[in-house]
Image (cartoon, rainbow, N blue to C red):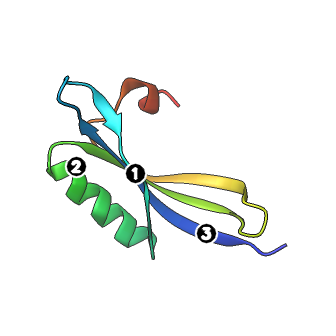
Amino acid sequence: MAVATWFVVQPFEWSKKGRMIQCDAREWQSAEAACREALRLAARGGGAVAVARTGDPETGEFTESVVLGVYGSLPDEILQT
């Protein structure tokens, strides 16, 4: 079993109806790059979560997820998990 770590930023933005909505997640090369991008997105008025996910790339099973940073405004249901 091969193990790899992905650094992902999950952004959120305000919809025209005033709701916080999830946008497409993007992968980054390092934890630092993911946190910088999440902070940049939050500074634009939305929010973002930077996460490190470890797992097997062949099976797609993740064994661990670590929140690297939470930035800006996020939906309540995200903050409760």
The mark closer to the camera, 1 or 2, is: 1
Label 1 sits on a secondary structure element that is: loop
The residue carrying pointer 3 sits among few (fewer than 14), some (14 to 19) or many (20 or more) residues within 10 Å by Cα, namely: some
- Earlier in the chain: of badge 1 and badge 3, it is 3
Which residue occupies 15% across, 43% down? Answer: 45
Q: Which residue is mark 2?
A: 42
Query: Can you give x and y, in whole percent of width and height, for residue 31 in the image?
Result: 44, 68
Residue denoted by label 3: 5
Q: In this view of the protein, which residue sits in the foreground, 19 or 63?
A: 19
Q: Position of residue 17 (x, y in %)?
A: 20, 23
Q: Give the Cα separation between the discs numbered 1 and 2.
A: 15 Å
Report the mark closest to the observer, 1 or 3: 1
Residue at 21%, 59% (x, y): give it: 40
Which mark is first along the chain, 2 or 3?
A: 3
Q: In the shown orientation, is residue 45 left or right of residue 51?
A: left
Kindly state the secondary structure of the residue where label 3 is placed. Answer: strand
Q: Is residue 57 above or below residue 69?
A: below
Left or right of 14 on screen, residue 64: right
Badge 3 vs badge 2, beta-carbon distance below 8 Å:
no
Q: Amino acid at mark 1?
A: Asp
Q: Farthest right residue?
A: 1
Q: CA distance from mark 1 to mark 3?
A: 19 Å
Residue 24, numbered label: 1
Q: Earlier in the sequence, mark 1 or mark 2?
A: 1
**Amino acid at the residue labelled 2:** Ala
Q: Residue 41 occupies which quadrant of the picture?
A: bottom left
Is 14 drawn above or below residue 56 in the view shown? above
